[in-house]
Image: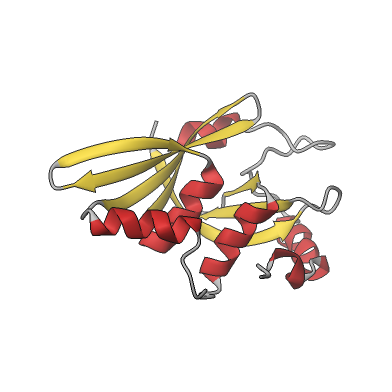
Amino acid sequence: MSNISMYVHAITLDADSKSPILILKEENGERTLPIWIGLLEATAIATEMEKIEFARPMTHDLSVNLLKKMEIKIPRIEISDLKDNTYYALITLKQGDRVLTVDARPSDAVAIALRADARIFVNESVLKITQPIKGTSIKIGERTPNEDERWGKLLEEMDPAAVRYKI
């Protein structure tokens, strides 16, 4: 299966559970992939998206800094699989001619990708096997006529302070 290039479109909150949702959007298309993540992971992604700097490196910053010091590049990450309602990701590391992949949670992979300017991909098979959203026959990643309205409403109702990192 091929990989679909995507980008972080938004972080929003689930209207029912108030859990953060990472929204990936297809670069050259209309599909989206919402991934429910933890509040700390959402904060790590949001702070990088908003270019908030801290006096000391946070965990994902430290990871990227260590790899850079060892001259290891992070060219890409991939949301590679979905098993038992759990997404899996791979971080690709490159040092010279040597290429390795490391298993990661999607939220960590995305947080690292943003800090390393790495490309974000989703395996086509993941988009095809995603489960329908509860209470509807619409599959995650499938575009619908009211999608913009639905996500717009969620974003309008979201309290921005809910995903900001506080020290």
Instruction: Tell me if I can see residue 27 in this picture.
Output: no
Q: Is residue 130 above or below residue 162?
A: above
The residue lying furthest to the left in this view is 97
Horizontal placement of 20 versus 56: left or right? right
Which image quadrant for residue 84?
Answer: top right
Which of the 4 image quarters holds residue 128?
A: top right
Residue 160 percent across, percent down from the top left: 74, 71
Question: In the shown orientation, is residue 151 left or right of residue 110?
Answer: right
Residue at 23 percent of width and 46 percent of height: 94
Question: Residue at the spot x=57%, y=60% of the render?
Answer: 44
Task: Say whether residue 23 is left or right of residue 101.
Answer: right
Q: Position of residue 41 (x, y in %)?
A: 61, 53
* Viewer-nearest residue: 29 or 6: 6
Q: How many marks?
A: 0
Q: Where in the figure is residue 92, as x and y percent of width and height?
A: 32, 43
- Depth order, front residue of 90/146: 90
Q: Is residue 34 visible?
A: yes
**Residue at the (76%, 50%) spot, across then down:** 19
Which image quadrant: the N terminus?
top left
Q: Is residue 84 above or below residue 167?
A: above
Nearer the observer, 32 or 57? 57
Front-most of residues 76 and 167: 167
